[in-house]
Image (cartoon, rainbow, N blue to C red):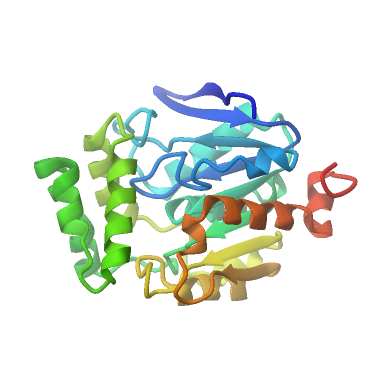
């Protein structure tokens, strides 16, 4: 594979940084809260090999991108950032948008506002029903932010530990979390995002998803391993979306969302479906 080309996109005083690799129809990847652009397909090159131009970027305050400053980390801002990346990097083409958790919510917010720009959606581990969180849940996010500010990455890991998980999964989650947090230039900005993103909603209740007539692949994880992204929420998203389809891993396996190669193959297969090819303007699979 060729070396990914680095890019910068300016939005006001803020610079978003990302990379692009491959040729063909665009797929834009949008990561989750506390992650970076690497943590959607986890470094897999399967999508560019299947003839897609893969565009990924670090959300505001994450990875190599600038902190939000005074403009905040709510879903209106995140969706506008995604629209700007599409403006600058997708060359006016409809794109497949794929995102995990916060990224999935950002994609839904943009698609509801501008469905004509979206060829299809891959919504990985959605975790919101569009209803504001209760104070107890918000306090949990605030504790994570405080731990990150006070004691850095190791403090965050201690605050984020889930003793209910089997030891093998606890070790995996800790390793992945440590690795992804080490990729951030501005951990203080990540802490701000931990407080603000959970206080924002991408839409006003699941009923709004019924208005989205766009092909959608919803990727669910079983709660025994990934309780932060509840299976019933993903199931509800797939049921409300007019063209939604649910996919998941077998129970007991590592979450599909964590398996970059397998997830990429699922996305590529979805992109080859006639309904998606038509919206992309692709004459045939792999064209």
Q: Which of the 4 image quadrants contains residue 227?
A: bottom left
- Image x and y of residue 240, in percent: 60, 73
Residue 151 location, quadrant: top left
Q: Residue furthest front?
A: 168
Quadrant holding the C terminus: top right
Q: How many marks?
A: 0
Q: Is residue 60 above or below residue 221?
A: above
Toward the viewer: 65 or 286? Answer: 286
The image position of residue 77, as x and y in percent, is 43, 41
Residue at figure coordinates x 51%, y 55% from the top left: 259
The residue lying at 9 percent from left, 43 percent from top is 150
Identify the residue at image location x=21%, y=58%. 160
Q: Percent from the top left, x then y, of residue 247?
A: 60, 69
* Relative height, residue 180 to residue 167 (above, below): above
Q: Specify whether 169 is left or right of 12.
A: left
Left or right: residue 59 versus residue 169 is right
In the current view of this chain or complex, which residue is farthest to the right? 283
- What quarter of the picture does the N terminus occupy? top right
Camera-nearest residue between 260 and 34: 260
For the question of whether residue 211 can be seen, the reply is: yes
Indicate whether 228 appears above or below 66.
Answer: below
Residue 42 percent location from the top left of the image: 49, 45
Note whether residue 143 is visible: no
Height in image: 37 above or below 257?
A: above
């Amino acid at each position: 594979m060729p070396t990914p080309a680095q890019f910068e996109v300016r939005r006001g005083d803020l610079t978003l940084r990302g990379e692009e690799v491959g040729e063909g129809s665009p797929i834009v990847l949008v990561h989750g809260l506390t992650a970076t652009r690497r943590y959607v397909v986890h470094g897999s090159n399967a999508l560019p090999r299947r003839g897609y131009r893969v565009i990924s970027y670090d959300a505001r305050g994450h990875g190599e991108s600038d902190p939000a400053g005074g403009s905040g980390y709510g879903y209106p801002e995140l969706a506008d950032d995604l629209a700007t990346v599409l403006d600058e990097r997708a060359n006016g083409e409809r794109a497949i948008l794929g995102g995990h958790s916060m990224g999935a919510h950002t994609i839904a917010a943009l698609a509801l506002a501008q469905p004509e720009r979206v060829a299809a959606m891959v919504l990985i581990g959605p975790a919101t029903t569009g209803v504001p969180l209760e104070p107890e849940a918000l306090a949990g996010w605030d504790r994570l932010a405080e731990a990150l500010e006070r004691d850095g990455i190791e403090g965050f890991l201690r605050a984020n530990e889930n003793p209910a998980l089997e030891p093998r999964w606890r070790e995996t989650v800790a390793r992945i979390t440590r690795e992804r947090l080490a990729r951030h230039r501005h951990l203080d900005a990540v802490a701000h995002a931990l407080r603000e993103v959970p206080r924002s909603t991408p839409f006003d209740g699941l009923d709004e998803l019924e208005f989205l007539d766009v092909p959608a692949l919803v990727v669910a994880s079983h709660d025994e391993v990934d309780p932060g992204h509840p299976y019933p929420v993903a199931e509800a998203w797939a049921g409300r979306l007019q063209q939604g389809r649910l996919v998941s891993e077998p129970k007991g396996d590592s979450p599909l969302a964590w398996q970059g190669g397998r997830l990429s193959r699922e996305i590529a297969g979805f992109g080859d479906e006639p309904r998606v090819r038509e919206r992309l303007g692709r004459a045939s699979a792999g064209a």
